[in-house]
Image: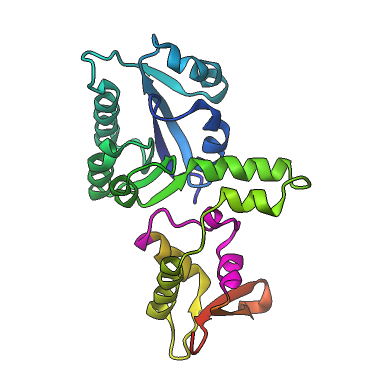
Amino acid sequence: MESDFRLAVLIDGDNIPSAYVKEMLEEIAKYGNPTIKRIYGDWTRPTLSKWKNVLLENAINPIQQYGYTQGKNATDSAMIIDAMDILYAGQVNGFCLVSSDSDFTKLATRLREAGMKVFGIGEKKTPEPFIVACDKFIYLEILKSDTKEAENTAVTSKTEKKDDVDKITPKVVRLISSTISDLADDDGWAFMGDVGSLLQKRQPNFDSRNYGFEKLTPLINSIGKFEIDQRDSYKGKFKLIYVRNKKGK
């Protein structure tokens, strides 16, 4: 995404482990420029002490929010109020909501209604309503495993890799197949880039990394139910990848 696409990154400190901060910010930078970075929590609580060590080095602004009543999450309310203030100020083009809490489902929906691009980041325990309320949702576990794999490529076994990723289920195959069919030309071919975009719209948490692949093309190729064709682009400067459902599959 273009570098002038400004993002407000709002982190639920009560709900996200500090161990993911480096990978999380690197991922966010792929989608835009994080001009606002705030984290919300009650910083008098010992449970947030690990966050304090990484805030300065990552230029994240801590927002203090006391828990006024036991059992009620004042942090969520503060984060939602700030998000709406930022929205009306017109300072950004999109939001990145970092939490695994379904309480932010309505916020994500409201921001998208206002024309904002909304990225969600959270753990795999994140409830489905929050995931589908975002334009794109990224699992923190995948970001962490990506880094570990890069650092330990030589020692990571195939068995370990399988344990870290989701299985390609028949439901996933049907999703890919129907998406290709909806985009296909008269010969059944669909441009891979369009397939990826539509998959993201239909299932915001769809990510080839969830299944152990860096890109969509090797993921689809591994299934064995699709044909892939590489074609020269205009002037032959690069390859265009097309895909179609195999006949009889």
Q: Residue at x 28, y 37 (%)?
A: 104
Q: Quadrant of residue 11?
A: top left
Q: Find the residue positioned furthest to the right.
A: 154
Left or right of 239 in this view: 28: left
Q: Main secondary structure of the magenta part?
A: helix
Q: Is residue 104 magenta?
A: no
Q: Is residue 203 magenta?
A: yes
Residue 133 vs residue 167, the one in the foreground: 167
Residue 187 vs residue 162, the one in the foreground: 162
* Looking at the image, residue 241 lies above or below residue 154: below
Q: Residue at x 41, y 19 (%)?
A: 62
Residue 230 vs residue 76, the one in the foreground: 76
Q: Residue at x 26, y 31 (%)?
A: 80
Q: Residue at x 57, y 21 (%)?
A: 57
Q: Find the residue positioned furthest to the top.
A: 44
Q: Position of residue 217 (x, y in %)?
A: 58, 68
* Looking at the image, residue 163 lies above or below residue 184: above
Region in magenta: 201-223
Q: Position of residue 12 (x, y in %)?
A: 37, 28
Q: Position of residue 118 (x, y in %)?
A: 35, 46
Residue 165 vs residue 42, the one in the foreground: 165
* Looking at the image, residue 210 lies above or below residue 144: below
* Looking at the image, residue 205 lies above or below residue 78: below
- The colour scheme used here is rainbow
